[in-house]
Amino acid sequence: MKVKPRGPILDQPVVLLVEDETLVRLTQVDILREAGFWVLEAEDADEAFEMLRRRKDVSVVLTDVDMPGSLDGFEFARLVSQGWPDLGVLVISGKAFPDDGDLPPSAVFVAKPVYPDVLVEHLNHLIARSHPVG
């Protein structure tokens, strides 16, 4: 079940989570909500792009590399950086690792398993980098 906010989200950074494996996604949603994020869920790049086009409040994107459809997480991160250059992307995988040029400067890669505190730390760093205070 996907929860859609009905009003403005107050003081909660919005994470767009792109993960096709339900159990992994549910675990990540719990971790992110516990850390104070508002979480939007997408199962593939097409659904994620639709959300990015509709929503202007996304603070950061978290994506797996392996996902259904024609794009993997690396290509998805490159396209996000082209369409939303100020948006940071955290790419995670336990199977595929980026080669030189696979990721844009706005993206960071972390190998699985990713501990919850490390995941949150990376997301907060990407948000701070793309939304400087002051």
Image (spheres, helix red, strand yellow):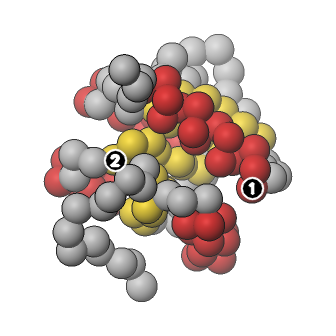
Determine crowd level at label 1: few under 14, some 14-19, many 20+ residues with C-alpha closer than 10 A. Answer: some
The image shows residue 22, relative to residue 48, as above or below, that is below
Q: Residue at x 49, y 24 (%)?
A: 129
The image shows residue 86, relative to residue 43, as above or below, that is above
Residue 67: x, y in percent? Answer: 53, 56
Q: Is residue 41 visible?
A: yes
The image shows residue 85, relative to residue 80, as above or below, that is above
Q: Quadrant of residue 103?
A: top right
The image quadrant where one finds the C terminus is top left
Q: Which residue is mark 2?
A: 58
Q: Is residue 16 visible?
A: no
Mark 1 touches mark 2? (CB < 8 Å): no
Pick the residue in front: 114 or 73: 114
Calculate the distance from the C-alpha at mark 1 to the C-alpha at mark 2: 20 Å
What amino acid is labelled 1 in the image? Pro
Pick the residue in front: 60 or 109: 60
The image shows residue 4, relative to residue 57, as above or below, that is below
Q: Secondary structure at mark 1?
A: helix
The image quadrant where one finds the N terminus is bottom left
Q: Quadrant of residue 125?
A: top right
Q: Residue at x 38, y 53 (%)?
A: 11
Residue 91: x, y in percent? Answer: 60, 40
What amino acid is labelled 2 in the image? Val
Q: Which residue is mark 1?
A: 116
